[in-house]
């Protein structure tokens, strides 16, 4: 680019030519100075910084600028705004998937631990403790043909020791002091204490057995306990019998069922000895201390359509002797509630 000397000087002094571009402008004086061996003179523009505040001579700052009215007055390229994310961090590719997998694994492990805990709670909580071997036995276990115990019954009432739907064993060690009248009464008392702590007032049935869970015949049991029943009555009773315990008020009262080989003959024998029945059965049914009269006064009664007989033993303690014949059995109770509860249970079984 060539300008006249004066034009170059004018432009340079006016500050319109930046110093870094000055050496690229060539004028005639430069040729003269070069031929005479002089170094070209460069006018000093001073320390004043070039001004870019004006719009003159800038083709990009006019109204036709492609950058619009908001373009910078300096003529430089527009500044790209920097986005402020605050405390948030820009997403890293692939990191979100790792977070999902990590937290998903933790969730699965927590659910597994909860499931295991619930399982053990339900399984262990549902198990019943094994019945105690002392103090009157427990629920009646099933037996094989050889008399070997298999699996014990689970009580119907979760808070009960004895079953109310099936017979329970009442073991007696007949070869020791437990086989005496005092020992048998002690076993009966221990069982009645547990029945008294049950929440159910339904009758609890017991089958008296030896220590091998073999049921005792009634004749053997009557002999061990010292019952004074006449022999003609004992001979009419089959081996099978049951003792019942019923929670009546604040105490447990007993009942008895005897399977009969000949009901007609038993009726005749009972009529002949009726007033003595409480005395005959005193060691079994009234071991808790009731004062049994030598001769009881029996009267007729009814339970539904069933003819019954009863005698008051202790009116203040609601103790009596009630009996009736039902389904080839002689049924006896030591209170009205006990007697009727046993009959009701037998009627359900008979159906």
Image (spheres, rainbow, N blue to C red):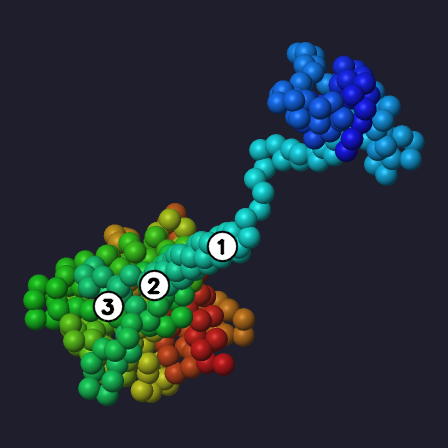
| Residue 48, above or below 120 | above
Rendered view: 7 above or below 285: above
CA separation in Å, label 3 and label 1: 67 Å
Residue located 33% across and 71% down the image: 153
Q: Nearer the viewer, mark 2 or mark 3?
A: 2
User: Residue 327's image quarter?
Assistant: bottom left
Q: Which of 81 and 202 is in front in this view?
A: 81
Measured Cα–Cα span from mark 2 to mark 3:
23 Å
Q: In this view, does 267 lie to the left or right of 144?
A: right
Residue 98, which numbered label? 1
| Figure check: 282 above or below 264 | above
Q: Where is residue 335 in the image (x, y as percent from the top left)?
A: 39, 59
- Secondary structure found at label 1: helix
Comparing labels 3 and 1, the label whose residue is closer to the camera = 1
Crowdedness of circle 3 by 10 Å Cα count: few (<14), some, many (20+)?
Answer: many
The residue labelled by disc 2 is 127
**How many discs mark residues in the rendered view?**
3
């Amino acid at each position: 680019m060539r300008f006249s000397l004066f034009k170059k000087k004018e432009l340079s002094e006016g500050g319109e030519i930046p110093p870094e571009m000055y050496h690229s402008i060539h004028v005639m004086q430069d040729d003269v100075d070069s031929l005479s061996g002089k170094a070209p003179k460069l006018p000093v523009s001073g320390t004043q910084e070039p001004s870019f505040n004006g719009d003159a001579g800038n083709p990009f700052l006019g109204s036709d600028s492609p950058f619009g009215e908001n373009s910078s007055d300096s003529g430089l390229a527009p500044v790209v705004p920097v986005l402020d994310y605050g405390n948030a961090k820009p997403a890293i590719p692939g990191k979100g998937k790792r977070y999902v997998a990590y937290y998903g694994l933790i969730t699965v492990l927590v659910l597994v631990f909860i499931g295991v805990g619930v399982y053990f709670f339900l399984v262990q909580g549902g198990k019943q403790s094994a019945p105690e071997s002392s103090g009157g036995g427990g629920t009646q276990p099933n037996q094989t043909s050889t008399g070997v115990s298999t699996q014990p019954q689970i009580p119907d009432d979760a808070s009960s020791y004895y079953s109310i739907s099936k017979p329970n064993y009442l073991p007696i060690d007949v070869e020791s002091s437990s086989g005496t009248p005092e020992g048998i009464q002690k076993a009966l008392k221990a069982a009645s204490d547990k029945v008294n702590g049950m929440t159910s007032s339904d009758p609890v049935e017991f089958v008296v057995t030896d220590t091998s869970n073999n049921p005792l015949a009634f004749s053997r049991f009557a002999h061990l306990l010292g019952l004074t029943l006449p022999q003609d009555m004992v001979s009419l009773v089959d081996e099978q019998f049951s003792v019942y315990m019923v929670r009546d008020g604040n105490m447990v009262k007993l009942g008895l069922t005897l399977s009969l080989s000949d009901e007609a003959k038993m009726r005749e024998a009972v009529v002949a000895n009726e007033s003595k029945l409480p005395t005959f059965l005193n060691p079994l049914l009234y071991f808790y201390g009731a004062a049994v009269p030598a001769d009881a006064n029996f009267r007729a009664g009814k339970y539904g359509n069933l003819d019954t007989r009863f005698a008051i033993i202790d009116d203040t303690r609601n103790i009596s002797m009630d009996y009736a014949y039902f389904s080839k059995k002689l049924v006896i109770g030591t209170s009205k509630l006990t007697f009727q509860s046993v009959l009701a249970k037998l009627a359900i079984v008979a159906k």
